[in-house]
Image (cartoon, rainbow, N blue to C red):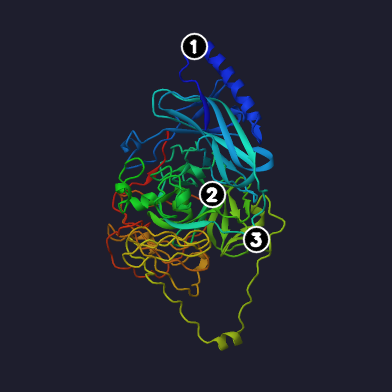
Amino acid sequence: MRSITRAGLRAIGLLAATGALCAAATVPAMADEPGTTWQPELSEGTGNGVVVSPDGARFDRSTAFGAPADEGDTESSADPAEVVPTGLLTLAPHTLDTPTREVDSRLVADTPHGSTASVDVRGKRAGGGWTEWIPAEGSRTELPEAVTEVQGRLVLTATGAADPTVREVTLTATPSAGAEGEPLTEAAPRSYSVFATREGLVGGTTANGHKIVNRDRFVALPSRRALSANGKTDYSVKVCAPNGRCAIAPVWDIGPWNTKDDYWNPSNERQMWKDLPQGVPQAAAARNGHNGGKDQFGRKVANPAGIDLGDGIFWDVLGLKDNSQVQVDYLWTGSQRLSAIRTEGAPDVQILARPETGAESVGIAVDATEVPVQCTSGAFVRIGDGQYLPTTAFAGLPGDVPACDAPAAPTPSDASAAGPTPAAPSAPGASAAPGGSAAPAASGGSTSPAASGGTAAPAASGGTAAQAAAGSAAPAAPAGPAASPAPGGSATSPAPGGSAGAAGSPAPAAPSAPAGAAPASPAPSPSGADRPGTGAPAAGGSTAGTPSPGPTPTPAPTSDVPDGASQAARVMPGSAQRAPSGTP
């Protein structure tokens, strides 16, 4: 970041004179550089923790976010030296005449001691979605692919008494050697099994400035690289519970635990914790000794959470009674075509188990989220295996969406010739051992629970096995015929009534996102009136139907949490649920 700072100036006249000299010195230099240069209007920006006035964009500590807080372990418990209050201001996007992969950023800013001003940059992909926000290194940001639309985001921080102010932003895009183009093949988004907690705290403020309402429907991830602006859905996830129910919801907050843990990215691309395998949240690794068992703020990690769920997602949509392992698809990481949901005023739309009116609901898609479009079946669009939305739920669909190929039903003679259908073979360690981690699915794949006492390494997008954490083994699950889901799209479900097991029972390994196979029911987590996340109030959302009770598989014998980067860790009584940071 090339920043022209004025922190040491003492007189108004000197300030103005120096600004003029800096501008005069800067503009000719840019004229010699190839590319397109523009200056976004600060007054058109939106965000949280930043106030825009005629003097510029000033850091606002009253609305800035710091360390993600927990109900039982508040932000004040973090090491003050590690907490950096941060404000974000998203600037207007800019369309280019030629593609670029490199953007240079320059600021005219006042940055007193203990404060910083920098820029994140992203680009719009050929398929219509955005890349993640990439923090500038020095003055340069390199995007993952050539784009013709670029957007900047101011990042202001302050740990001292004085606040930084940015007066001017100049961005320069260097033409790329390669042209922007459509991806040759569609790649499914990255998908990992992670531990989920409930966000809670109605009335709090998220990192993007959203005021949390009762039964809210959004999620939080521990990195600002995938944070959507308030009210926007640029970054969304599909999260599926062990009972087969799923929700597609936007990322509106940062957490749990960390703020620089983009664990879904390859290790060499992670902003922090590059020593961990792809797909393993640092909080999960900390439960097994990573970083001394602490998060980036020096707090002792009480649960291995990699995602937080708004109360409406947690209780009403997924039907969770307690913290749980879930399967998460990070939708912006794939190259599948995405189309936006438009509900005409409703908060969400029901995902149906079959392409027909009146079919069972297997989840919801929040309004304005962009969902993967696979094919059409009459008046319905398939967005996943056993997951359909009506075409009327979309603002618009691509003109080349193919029709779904319906497999032919077997004839009685075919069935007789084939003989009795063999039972599906069990994967090694199908009943997840306590502390064992489900191997995150490769794109479009399924997870394989670790054998008793072991840890399965996450598989990277495309099916490449990620590096296993120290002391971990990754047994392969044999392929076999998929089990049929229970009516309503729900698979084997928890014991009726959500009855809890003994305190200290392990968190389950999660199944893959429903792909026709019925995920195994989790072993119940400890619950009780004194435990956060238990005893869900009566559902008040629009989700129709609940999973049908089914046979519960016998859990594996209890064992201690193993060493390594296990994602599924024992939930100890009193583990704090995540709560939003910010001003209530």
Q: Position of residue 89 (x, y in %)?
A: 53, 33
Q: Is residue 243 above or below residue 394?
A: below
Q: CA distance from mark 2 to mark 3?
A: 21 Å
Q: Position of residue 165 (x, y in %)?
A: 50, 24
Q: CA distance from mark 3 to mark 1?
A: 66 Å
Specify which label sits upstream in the sequence, 3 or 1. 1
Question: What amino acid type is highlighted by mark number 1?
Answer: Ala
Rendered image quadrant of residue 257: top left
Of 103 and 479, the residue lying toward us: 103
| Of labels 1 and 2, the one closer to you | 1
Specify which label sits upstream in the sequence, 2 or 3. 2
Question: What amino acid type is highlighted by mark number 2?
Answer: Ser
Quarter placement of the C terminus: top left
Question: Disc 3 designates what residue?
Answer: 380
- Specify the farthest residue to the front: 32
Is residue 520 rendered to the left or right of residue 95? left
Q: Position of residue 349 (x, y in %)?
A: 58, 53
Residue in view at x 40 percent, y 27 percent:
114
Question: Disc 2 designates what residue?
Answer: 236
Rendered image quadrant of residue 121: top right
- Residue 533 seen anywhere in this rendered image of the structure: no
The label shown at residue 11 is 1
How would you rate the neighbour count of disc 1 (Cα within 10 Å): few for under 14, some for 14-19, many for 20 or more?
Answer: few
How would you rate the neighbour count of disc 2 (Cα within 10 Å): few for under 14, some for 14-19, many for 20 or more?
Answer: many
Of 570 and 166, the residue lying toward us: 166
Of 377 and 175, the residue lying toward us: 175
Asked whether the beta carbons under mark 1 and mark 2 sit within 8 Å of each other, the answer is: no
Instruction: Give the structural element (helix, strand or loop) at label 1.
Output: loop
Question: What amino acid type is highlighted by mark number 3?
Answer: Phe
How would you rate the neighbour count of disc 3 (Cα within 10 Å): few for under 14, some for 14-19, many for 20 or more?
Answer: many
| Of labels 2 and 3, the one closer to you | 2
